[in-house]
Image (spheres, rainbow, N blue to C red):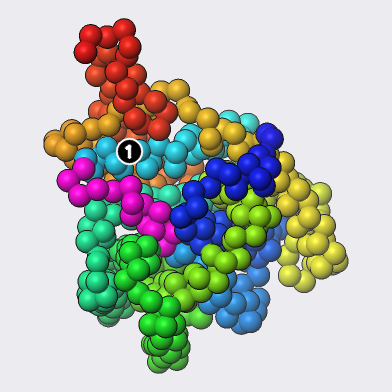
Amino acid sequence: MSFPTPAEVASQTPPDRDRAIDVIRICALMGVVAGHTVMATSMIRDEVFIWGNLLTTSVLFQALTWVLQIMPLFFFAGAAASVTSWQPGASWGGWLMKRCTRLFRPVFYYLAFWAVTLAALYPLLPIHIYEPIAGISVQLLWFLGAYVLMLAAIPLLCRINTPAHLAAGVVAVWLFVLAIDVVRLHVPGTALLGYLNMTVWLIPGMFGVAYRRGVLDGRWALRIGVGMFAVNLALLAFGPYELSLVGIEGQRLANMTPPSLLLAGHAIMMCAFVIAAAPAINRWAQRPRVWWLTAIGNSGAMTLYLWHMPALLLTHLAFCYLGLYRYPGEPNFFWLSAFQLALVLAVVMVLFLVLRPLENAPLRGWDGAAPLAPGARSVAVGVLLCLAGAAILAAVKWGLKDDGIACVAVMLVALVGARLLSYAPAGAVTSPDGDRRRNAAAPR
């Protein structure tokens, strides 16, 4: 639970590290945590748990999502950080397994917590209070599924070496999403095609690769960002798209689930702007205290992202049972909000301190996958990890109930299968980071 000092963090940081990537990653996650915490509302009416969002109450709040919807930047930072670790001709499945090892490590603890908690709550809560809790419990994992699929495409994205490559890739995805939106809006019974728009998350991946390779300079990035902002405004004014870039009830065409053309344009805009701002971000990150906070935050990024939701959700449930509803129009809404937000923040900080070590400590049976040579076994591992990501995306519709439980089971089976295929040969010892070393006692 202890942290290294700023001097220790500085001494362990390579002088050529692009600190902007780390700042962008943790700021994106902090933005998500803050947005969920501030915007969430709840009440219990007739033994029904109503989980709401302040976005439904104000056009101003919806407009702010054009600034605060910064999830594309996490994909941007993840792709930028992955560029140097992928080498053409390497084992795709082995590389993806190594990236997923730490990514999924805290998820196993998270799912175990919800399995125990929901089992305890099931006999205690009315069904229409229990089911929303179970449904919301794993909603955050949509990101993990989309992120794994984006990582799986890194070998393809790493072919971006010129501005023409970047333009061709981004325009191709943007036009594909446009075509899907046109079909699902005008052809009855094709709504499910919208989920092909998950390809939107390849766009920030492309920009992340381009940024790391210096393909796009700051001036051109700024121009692209401004131009895309204008295109997005036109889509909003003349197209069928909603103002809020975060999903809320009552939308004619959700921008987030599944992604829309407007979200694709927003991803382009945000990534272009952050590339233009990267030199300034890097200079800011040179400050010892800023870099120390950035390094500490990133050392438990998944812990922070995952565990803020149980803290938020269970705090709301407790307040509702006390008759203290944080819901528009309820008495003392402002003061109750301030107290509840402070409480959730304190709980999240405690959870971060306590659970961060689990994210960084090897998990027996999961860590220690052996490096794989290119071939059929490598491909099988990669396919199973992609299946796990797709199963997570499917599970979000139901949460930990109904068909969602089956989807989570598929995810776990796929992960176990990928890990079993990543076995270490006899006589080899595999370190937690996946590097295989021959046992000193074994014959050479």
- Relative to 15, residue 358 above or below: above
Q: Amino acid at mark 1?
A: Met
- Relative to 255, residue 323 above or below: above
84 magenta-colored: yes
- Relative to 190, residue 442 above or below: above
Residue picked out by circle 1: 97
Can residue 116 be seen here? The reply is: yes
What residue do we see at 50% from left, 52% from top?
A: 15
Q: Quadrant of residue 193?
A: bottom left
What residue do we see at 67% from left, 39% from top?
A: 3
Q: Could you say where residue 77 lies in the image, as x and y percent from the top left?
A: 44, 59
Q: Quadrant of residue 412?
A: top left
Boundaries of the magenta span = 76-90
Q: Could you say where residue 168 lies in the image, as x and y percent from the top left?
A: 22, 75
46 magenta-colored: no
Q: Could you tell whether 405 is left or right of 38 in the image?
A: left
What residue do we see at 75% from left, 57% from top?
A: 341
Question: Label 1 neighbourhood size at 10 Å, few (<14), some (14-19), many (20+)?
Answer: many
Q: Could you say where residue 304 lies in the image, as x and y percent from the top left?
A: 60, 48
**Image quarter in which the N terminus is found:** top right
Q: In this figure, what is the number of numbered marks?
A: 1
- Relative to 335, residue 85 above or below: above
What residue do we see at 44% from left, 38% from top?
A: 102
Q: Could you tell whether 113 is left or right of 88 in the image?
A: right
Q: Quadrant of residue 434?
A: top left
Can residue 266 be seen here? The reply is: no
Q: Nearer the viewer, residue 414 or 250?
A: 414
Q: Nearer the viewer, residue 184 or 214?
A: 214
Q: Could you tell whether 386 is left or right of 320 in the image?
A: left
Q: Nearer the viewer, residue 407 or 166?
A: 166
